[in-house]
Amino acid sequence: MRKPVLYLVCTLGALVALCIGAAQFMHKLDNHNFAIVQSIGGDVVVRRQAGWWAQICPTIWVYPKAGIYICSNNAAEKDALNIQFNNKSTALMSCQIGYRIDTADDDTIIKLHQQVEGDDEKIWKKVYTTLNTVAQCVSSQFDPSAVIGGDKFPDFVKAMHDAILHNKDLLEQGIDVNSFTVDGRPDPDENTKTQFAKQREADLQKRLAEAEKIKLEAETLKTKANYEREIAEYKGKADAETAKLVTEAERQARLANIEAQKKVDVEKLEKEQMLVKAQKEKEVAAIAVTREKEVAEIEAEKERAVAEIAKRTEAERLETVRLQAEQKVAAAQAKQKEIELSGAITELQQMQLEYDYKKAAAKWESIGKGLAGMSLPAMVSMGGAGGEGAAGGFGRLVDAITLEKLRNLAK
């Protein structure tokens, strides 16, 4: 019975030893870590893939891929950033910072591994040192009262973000700061607190003074408002009366302007109408002158034509009278001759004949001389009563001339 039991124990021991030996060759890597693996031959690689792998006796350094650290001023940690402002006053600033180291290439990670010698805490020290330097540089540009109790705190936080996120110096070492959060306003030191207390007291007194001033100003404004209201009421009544008078004066002025403009417009219209009328009268007068000129020309032409006709008619009549006179003279001469030849006339008849002859001769001689010295008119009107007409009037003229001649001869 002892041999089978011993055999079983030996077998189990061998299996355990085999399992233990096999376990020495199997290695595990979690997802949130990566590993620096050095083989027996000294080759170093960066293993990023999570899971199990088999390798004979490697040297393995495991690093977290990312880390988040909190800098706080609580009793347990006391690792808040000590910052100094531009007036040399100090304060503690609590914050939270996160970084990754798996984003760098293998060579950079191996160089970082060589510096920190597998100690992840040294990587955090690098980050903390850079963060502290950046915080000092940024805080030295600000006034503590403006950051701790004033309106420059958002500007301060933004300056910190811009300076630490993806910091160039850390990136060159394979460390990428990808998050940063400030935990409230910085906590000032005792001197700064005392200064702030005094400043708050001064500010309080200032605010009280301002409040008192505002109160007094309010009362002054109230008094002034009441005074101005009373003055305004009185002035309003006076202004109303003045405005009424001014309105009436303006209305009268507008009416006067309207009437004056109306008068000007009427005078202008009358003047235009007079000009139109004068132009029309001028045109009518021109037409009348032209018409009178035409009528005068027609009348003159008519008178010239009538005078010409009358002149020709008178000349013909005178020629007829002359011929008739010559006929009478011839008849008288013939009668004289007949008497002389016959000897039958008496002495009285002889005297009568001589008288008639001399009368006729004188008559026609006077007519001839009168006609020779006369200028015939352009138009002769010789009308007479009893139907004598032109011949009767002319005969009387001839008789008058002849009678005057005989009177001259009798003398």
Image (cartoon, rainbow, N blue to C red):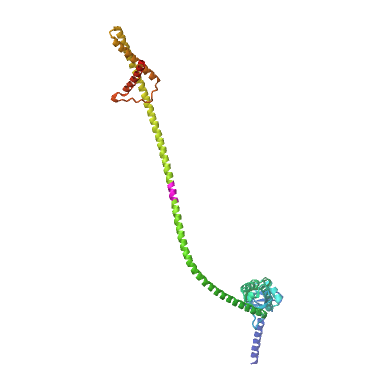
Predominant SS along the magenta part:
helix
**In this rendering, is residue 89 above or below 355?**
below
At which x and y percent is residue 124? 67, 77
At which x and y percent is residue 286? 42, 38
Residue in the picture at 45% in, 55% down: 256
Q: Residue furthest bottom?
A: 1
**In this rendering, is residue 405 above or below 304?**
above
State the image quarter where residue 283 is shown: top left
**In this rendering, is residue 27 above or below 395?**
below
Quadrant of the image for the N terminus? bottom right
246 to the left or right of 175: left
Residue 285 in view in this figure: yes
Residue 26 in view in this figure: no
Q: Nearer the viewer, residue 405 or 57?
A: 405
State the image quarter where residue 97 is shown: bottom right
Instruction: Answer whether residue 224 is magenta in the image.
Output: no
Q: Which residues are magenta?
A: 264-271
Q: Nearer the viewer, residue 272 or 349?
A: 349
Q: Nearer the viewer, residue 62 or 42?
A: 62
Quadrant of the image for the C terminus? top left
